[in-house]
Image: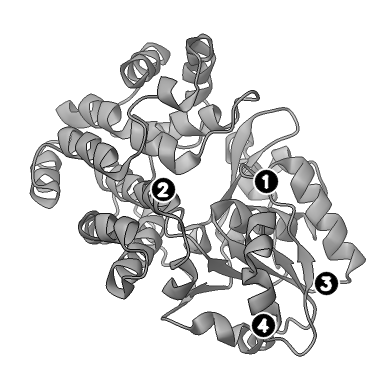
Amino acid sequence: MTTITYLTRIEFDFGLARRLPEFCAQLGMERPLLVTDAGLTALGLVAGLTETFAAAPEIFDGTPANPTEAAVLAGLEAYRAGDCDGILAVGGGSSLDLGKAVRLLAVHAPPLAQYAAVEGGMGKIRGPLPPMIAVPTTAGTGSEVGRGAVIIMADGRKLGVVSPLMLPDLAVCDPELTFALPPLLTAATGMDALAHCLETFMSAAVNPPAEAIAFDGLSRGYAAIRTATTDGGDRQARWDMMMASMEGAMAFQKGLGAVHSLSHPLGALPDVQLHHGTLNAVLLPAVLRFNRPVIGKKWERLQSALEGDPDVRIAALNEELGLPATLSAMGVERQYLPAVAAAALGDHCHATNPREATRVDYQAILEEAF
C-alpha cells in the first residue's frame, strides 16, 4: 500500500507578506509570536512586517544558524510570557524549524528529543497544535511546507522531529523577501533546494507525484540559480528559485538520502559553524556517484535536466557559484569523519537513500568530499 498526502495551504506571489495581518486573523491568531533571527531584525525586515499589524506581535529573534533545543526553550518562554496564541515564523529554514519546535512544546512537555523520528517520537505528537504561518525569506530549505524540524538537541545530536501535524497551517511564499539575499547565501540556499529535488527523485520509495514535482523543481532551479545569484533583483529567477525550493520540500516527504544523512551530523559539530545548504552542495557529487549503479534510467533523466553527467554538472555549478569544493575548505577536520559516518547510520534520511550505505560507505563518501 502506498500512502500519498499533499500537503498544506500555500499562498505564493509577490507582495503577499503585506497581508500577514489578514492571514493571522484567518487562523484566529490575535497574539502571534514572530520567530526570526537577529540578522533579519538588523536588516529592518522584521520592522517592515510588524508595522502592517494594528498591534505589533511579540518577537523572538534568538534563532541561531543551526537551531538548538536551548533556543527552542527560550522561544517557548517568550511565547508564554507574551500569552501568545500562535506562531508566525519568518526567515530561513532555521527560524521556520525553530518556530515549529516552539509550537510543538507549547502543548507538549519537553525534552524535545523524545519527539525525534529516530526515537519513535512521531506517535507521541498529538494535535491540535497552535496555528502557525511560515514565511520563508530564502529559497532553500522549503521548511514552510515540510513536516519536520531539524534541531540540535541538548545531547548534541542533530535530529529531525517529523509528523504531519508539524506542517504549518499556511505557507506564505513571497519572492520579494529574497531580493536582498546576498549572492553567496542565494547560491548556498539554492543548492539546498536542488539537493532536496535530486535526493527525492533518486529515492527508491514509491511516490510518482513526488518524483514529478522534484524533477520540475530541479529543472526550474538549475535554470534559475545562476541568474538569481548574479542578479538578485531578477523577478523571474527569484520566483523560480522560491518555487523550486517549495517543490523540493513538497516532494521530500518521499524521502531524502545520504547527502542529508551526512550533512545533519556535520551540522552538529561543536567547533565549527557549517551552513547546511553548502554542506549539501559539497556532498552531492560524491553521493551522486555512489547512487549511480542503482538508479537505472533516472540517471539518464538527470543527465537530460542537467545537460551532462549529474555529478560533473553539480561540481561545476558549485564552482561557478563560488561555493567551496571540499569539506576541508569549509573547515571540517578529518578527525571528525569517523564519528559523522557512524552518526549518519542513525539519521532519519538514511533509510530512503536508493543504495544502502554502510558506515564504511559513508566514510568513503566523506573522504571523497574531503
Q: Which residue is mark 3?
A: 84
Above or below for 177 versus 303: below
Q: CA distance from mark 4 to mark 1?
A: 25 Å
What quarter of the picture does the C terminus occupy?
Answer: top left
Q: Which residue is tagged 2?
A: 184
- Give the Cα distance between marks 3 and 4: 12 Å
- According to the image, label 1 marks what residue? 64
Q: How is colour applied across the structure in the image?
A: one colour
Q: Position of residue 132 (x, y in %)?
A: 65, 70
Alpha carbon of mark 4 to alpha carbon of mark 2: how far? 33 Å
Local crowd size for mark 3, using a 10 Å CA cut-off: few (<14), some (14–19), many (≥20): many
> At label 2, which amino acid type do we have?
Leu
Mark 4: amino acid: Cys
Residue 353 in view, yes or no: no
Task: Identify the mark nearer the N-term, 3 or 1.
Answer: 1
Q: Residue at x 58, y 72 (%)?
A: 169
**Element at label 1:** loop
The residue depicted at 45 percent of the width and 55 percent of the height is 182
Q: Position of residue 314 (x, y in %)?
A: 23, 39
Q: Residue furthest right?
A: 81
* Residue at which label 4 appears: 24
| Picture residue at 29% right of the left edge, 29% below the top | 287
